[in-house]
Image: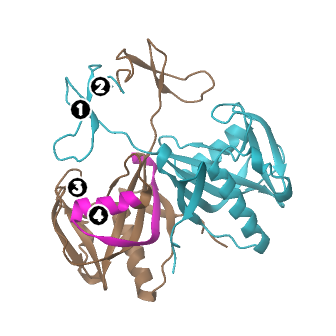
Chain colours: A cyan, B brown
Amino acid sequence: MKHCSQCGAVVSLKVPVDDNRERHVCDACDIIHYQNPKIVAGCIPVWEDKVLLCKRAIEPRHGFWTLPAGYMEMGETTAEAALRETLEEANARVELQGLYALMNLPHVNQVYMMFRSKLLDLKFSPGAESLEVQLFREDEIPWDELAFTTIRHTLRYYFEDQQRDSYQLRIGDIVKEGDGYGFVSSPPTTG
Amino acid sequence: MKHCSQCGAVVSLKVPVDDNRERHVCDACDIIHYQNPKIVAGCIPVWEDKVLLCKRAIEPRHGFWTLPAGYMEMGETTAEAALRETLEEANARVELQGLYALMNLPHVNQVYMMFRSKLLDLKFSPGAESLEVQLFREDEIPWDELAFTTIRHTLRYYFEDQQRDSYQLRIGDIVKEGDGYGFVSSPPTTG
């Protein structure tokens, strides 16, 4: 951010009065421009023992597989965002079955929220941001060609829970681990 | 938003190519400025059968009572944001006990995430954004002087669960109901 979105003047990084961190503050009109993390909402679309994945037609991670998900928009609920992304990226209609994964990604200022869902029919097809969409059984998942750490952990947990037919909300953080990223689970939310 | 935060030129509302909703797009450099909902993270700080509330020293809802909560910052996890807000607004140190409420507020583009927590000591005091901080038993809660619908529902559920000593994550949406707002619960996240 270089300019004030209200008046167009130049902004400077400074700590406003009564604040404790640097913000972009307008040199002319003094407006403080806050920046905050974004929510990425999406679905695990399930048909029998298979999960629907999308091959990304856009960067980052062009050509890698992902679950349908994307930035939550103004005026939406997280569930509405998940349904919309699933329709946009996979032309797939699903029924939501509850929040399944909530993952913090502080290094990229995102919070992922993935919902379990049932595909309502098999009339899916690639949306504008997908090259292919395809159903995968656990043993068919392209584990080495998944786009994001969040997707790998979400799928790993999902298939674990599918084995015992009992699904548990997974909450935690994606953290740096050696050359890559791992998942650190948070305390359970019930009890 | 009137000006481009990258080049300072005027922005126009239009639907970009391959998009399906209006965005602020720069007339000069064509950058698209996305806007997205924000996360409000906070705590239910508990001591024995009492909950710590803060009387707001700022607008909106100056003089009304709330749980310590505020906008999640860049580089944070939701849990870190909840701990920071509790320290900033109530000078209170807590141990988190898991996410307790996740509420969508599409009419104000927010998602609330409230954590159960145990106060580590009684050395709390009003932060810069609070007039008073005080512990309340259920029968002492100033129900008619609570700042927000989210807080009312979070506290109502919390005391219900406290009665039976079994806590359940509450997920749902704050929706318009007559003159005010109500809470519509989402399907359970487990099972």
Q: Which stretch did the figure color magenta?
A: B80-108
**Residue with the mark numbered 1:** A31
Please state which amino acid type lies under the numbered disc 4.
Thr
Question: Taking the image as drawn, is residue B163 in sight?
Answer: yes
| Vertical relation: A151 (above or below) B95 | above
Q: Amino acid at mark 3?
A: Arg
Q: Residue at x 26, y 63 (%)?
A: B87
Helix, strand or loop at label 4? It is helix
Quadrant of the rendered image containing residue B28: top left
Would residue B133 be found to the left or right of residue A116 on screen? Answer: left
Disc marking residue B86? 4
Q: Inspect the image, locate mark 2, and give the three-letter code of the amino acid beneath it.
A: Gln
Taking the magenta stretch, the answer to whether it contains residue B99 is yes
Whether pointer 4 and pointer 2 mark residues with C-beta atoms closer than 8 Å, the reply is no
Residue with the mark numbered 2: A6
**In what element is the residue under mark 2?**
loop
> Residue at point 34% right, 65% down?
B151
Q: Chain of mark 3?
A: B
The residue under label 1 is which amino acid type? Answer: Ile
Residue at label 3? Answer: B61
Q: Position of residue B83 (x, y in %)?
A: 34, 63
Q: Same chain for labels 4 and 1? Say yes or no.
A: no
Badge number at residue A190: none
- Which residue is pictured at 40% across the width and 64% down the height? B114
Q: Quadrant of the rendered structure where residue A114 is?
A: bottom right
Of the residues under marks 1 and 2, which one precedes in the sequence?
2
Q: CA distance from mark 3 to mark 1?
A: 22 Å
Q: Marks 2 and 1: in contact by CB < 8 Å?
A: yes
Chain containing the residue with disc 4: B
